[in-house]
Image: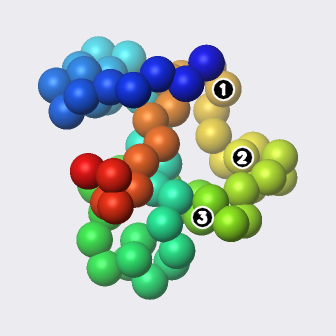
Amino acid sequence: MPTSVDRAEVRRLVAEEDAQLAEVLPRDEYDEEHLPEAIHLPLKELDAETAAALDRSRPVIVYCWDGL
């Protein structure tokens, strides 16, 4: 279930729960600047096959720089 989180919660989830970071902007924007360890899952290409790159046993934080 999607939940909005603030920066402090992102840091906690990554540190304590080994959360995955997923950047959803296009490749050029991901290449320009993304958070360390973030994987690239472009929103326009997101489907069951691309989402399979995620580990379902760990929390997932989906973000884009437009929303930060």
Identify whether 50 is placed above or below 45: above
Of marks 3 and 1, the one in the foreground: 3
- Report if residue 56 is visible in the image: yes
Q: Residue at x 38, y 17 (%)?
A: 17
Counting from the top left corner in percent of width and height, residue 48 is at: 83, 46
Q: Residue at x 34, y 61 (%)?
A: 66
Counting from the top left corner in percent of width and height, residue 52 is at: 75, 44
Amino acid type of disc 3? Pro
- Location of residue 34 (image quadrant): bottom left
Identify whether 4 is placed above or below 40: above
N-terminal of the two: label 3 or label 1? 3
Amino acid type of disc 2? Ala
Q: CA distance from mark 3 to mark 1?
A: 18 Å
Packing grade of label 1 (10 A; few <14, some 14-19, many >=20) is few
Q: Mark 2 sits on what residue?
A: 51
Q: CA distance from mark 2 to mark 3?
A: 10 Å
Q: Residue at x 26, y 50 (%)?
A: 68
Q: Residue at x 66, y 26 (%)?
A: 56
For the rendered model, the colour scheme is rainbow
User: What's the mark number on residue 14?
Assistant: none
Q: Mark 3 sits on what residue?
A: 42
Q: Mark 1 sits on what residue?
A: 56
In the rendered picture of this protein, how many numbered marks are placed on residues?
3
